[in-house]
Amino acid sequence: MDNAGRLRLPALRQLGNNLDLANAGQTNVLAEYTLHNLSDADFTYSGPAVIAVNAVLAELAPQFGFNPADPNYLFSFRNPVFSFLTAERLMIIYSEKGTEGVRAEVVKVRDAGAT
Amino acid sequence: MKFLQAAICAGVILSSSTAYVNGALADDQTKPGVGNAAAIALAKKSPIVESDYQFLLSQAQRIEDATLRKQTLDALGDPCIQHRAHLTDAQKDAIVLALTAEGLVNPADAASITGGVKAGIFPPVTNDGSACPKLPQAFFSAPGSTSVNGHHSYPGGLVVHESNNDVADVHLGEEYRQIYGHNGGKGGLPTIPRENQGRFSSAEGHFDADIFIDEDLIVAAPLWHDWAKPIVFQWNANGSEFTELNFGGFGTADNNGAPGDSRTGGHHIIGITEAMTRGLSPAFVITQASAHSAPTGGNEYKVVNWLRAAVIIARIDPVAKGYLGWTMLDACVCLRCGSWATT
């Protein structure tokens, strides 16, 4: 605990060598903590990619014999497409080639027998 | 911890609530997901999911620390869920009570979950309460997040997400070594090595640096940080996912009584719990816990609260285990000071 009675992160390695960072208003932080945090930041593109490609796939689905309103739509079409292609790949392709580019990718999944 | 012990003895049972999502009765989250088998079958057929899963296993093999390597490979396979081993219903109730009393869960956040807070913190697993509870689905069939609009929200999305994270973390470590870790300038002053200029993505890495960044932590933390997603993000019959309970705070005054919201996805805290239960080091566990927020910029309380929640679930003493609480003064009077120099 620090002088204010608060639980704090421990002084690992030599962080507590000559200074008491926690009681000096600082945090005992290792570089690996922040690097790991940065490495988990892919959601900033991956989340929007899923949402956008969901819409693209809903538009394309009838061409492949699926109805987005069908209760089985997720497991029969949407999920296989994402599991085989990923949202990020499809969003990047959509950004460059539009719906036709995504359709060509989905054809690969259909031909693989996954939808 | 005294309160936790008392709560366990009391064995108070908290009631669960019926859950409705978007006006419809949600799948029962007290039972394994009906769609788990379909998700496993789909993920098995996907080349990218299969290759990403193998990549994660190969990364785990790179870990030099024998304990961390062994535990990581076990956790990514078909593990016994160690924090759930021999855990009784009464103990679960007591843990929920302790988390609530500590302000580390807000029961209102479980309103949409069938089974309530208890189901959110203890999602159904196979052989629950036995010596070897099992994941309710394969590690490689779990998604990367909840809902159809979340990142990597499809069977196998977890291993795709973690592969990207692991490559990113390794590159970030190399970046720091390259920019801050060479003393080749005049008088031993730091520079970017001349031989690396113009090829910043050199594959051989920068392990000749004179600064220490623990590659085991770099490689292993992304493999562990979402370990609990196969438990939390189970598959409903229609291909949607279980609802995740956010906890690790109450949402109002979580910063040691000051305004703050440290609630986060339950998978994060459950994964930390498992790492603690397996005895992984403080440096590793805190690195893992920093995935959802670095403990800098006034956010240390968040990481601390997630560690606090995890130790309650794991039923361990955080200070004795070294996960929380030591300051320089403590360390100076501690007979185990030598352990702090290691990770």
Image (cartoon, grey):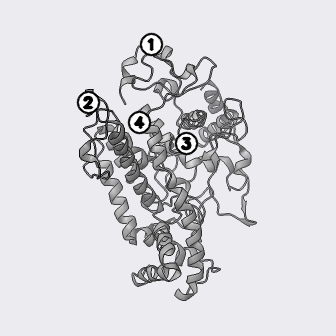
Name the kind of residue labelled 4 in the image.
Leu
Asked if labels 2 and 4 share a chain, the reply is yes
Mark number displayed over residue B280: 4
Q: Earlier in the sequence, mark 4 or mark 3?
A: 4
Q: Which residue is mark 1?
A: B332
Name the kind of residue labelled 3 in the image.
Ser
Mark number displayed over residue B293: 3
Name the kind of residue labelled 1 in the image.
Cys
Does residue B80 appear anywhere in the picture? no
What distance separates the C-alpha of mark 1 from that of mark 2? 38 Å
Mark 4, residues whose alpha carbon is within 10 Å: few (<14), some, or many (≥20)? some
Mark 2, residues whose alpha carbon is within 10 Å: few (<14), some, or many (≥20)? few
Which residue is farthest front? B186
Looking at the rendered structure, the secondary structure element under dot 1 is: helix
Rendered view: B103 above or below A22: below
Q: Which residue is mark 2?
A: B186
Quadrant (top left, top right, bottom left, bottom right) of the N terminus of chain B:
top right
